[in-house]
Image (spheres, rainbow, N blue to C red):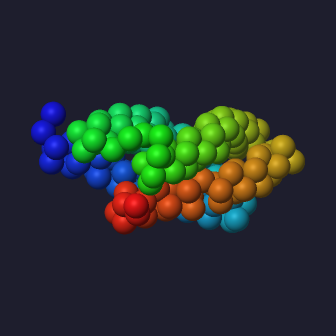
């Protein structure tokens, strides 16, 4: 594949990943702070959809296009900034996988609470705390990856 096309795909998927991630996190965080169950259900339902439609494909495309770019440029994967970008990528992924599971559970709990007129269970708020913690770890990792891709420190 042409280098510039590969680079364009990589940059666009990074943009989609970052934008969807921060946008989804913002809306879900804000909905949870309001504690309005209808708003929480709306936010969690759409965050789960956004993860499957935008985030998951962009995560896959990031790895494939990033490894392909390193290959085209003759950069080794096991040293330098590429290595650290991959370490951070897998760290962020290790944070994201449980977050996806949590969002699905939170969406389901919000749906039940909305349909039955009951409050959200304490488990919802425990998951919310873990969701915040894991997101707070993954977000700086993604920012650092973008910094490494732009700066390419030797």
Q: In the figure, 153 relative to 9: above or below?
A: below
**Residue shown at 15% from the left, 48% from the top:** 4
Q: Residue at x 47, y 46 (%)?
A: 79
Q: Residue at x 47, y 40 (%)?
A: 78
Can residue 126 be seen by looking at this rendering? yes
Task: Name the residue nearer the viewer: 108 or 134.
Answer: 134
**69 left or right of 89?**
left
Asked whether residue 96 is in view, the answer is: no
Near-viewer residue (87 or 118): 87
> Taking 35 as reference, is 30 left or right?
left
15 horizontally vs 109: left or right:
left
Q: Position of residue 53 (x, y in %)?
A: 41, 37
Q: Residue 27: name its quadrant.
A: bottom right
x%, y% of residue 150? Answer: 34, 63
The quadrant in which the C terminus is found is bottom left
Which quadrant: the N terminus?
top left
Q: Examine the image and state in which quarter residue 73 appears.
A: top left
């Amino acid at each position: 594949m042409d280098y510039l096309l590969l680079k364009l795909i990589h940059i666009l998927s990074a943009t989609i990943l970052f934008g969807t991630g921060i946008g989804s996190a913002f809306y879900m965080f804000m909905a949870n702070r309001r504690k309005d169950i209808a708003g929480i259900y709306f936010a969690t339902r759409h965050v789960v959809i956004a993860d499957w439609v935008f985030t998951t494909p962009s995560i896959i495309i990031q790895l494939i296009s990033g490894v392909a770019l390193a290959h085209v440029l003759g950069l080794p994967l096991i040293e330098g900034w590429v290595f650290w970008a991959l370490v951070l990528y897998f760290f962020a992924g290790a944070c994201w996988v449980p977050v996806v599971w949590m969002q699905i559970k939170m969406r389901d709990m919000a749906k039940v609470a909305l349909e039955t007129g009951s409050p959200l269970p304490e488990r919802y708020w425990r998951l919310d705390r873990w969701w915040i913690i894991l997101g707070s770890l993954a977000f700086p990792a993604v920012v650092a990856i973008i910094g490494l891709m732009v700066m390419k420190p030797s």
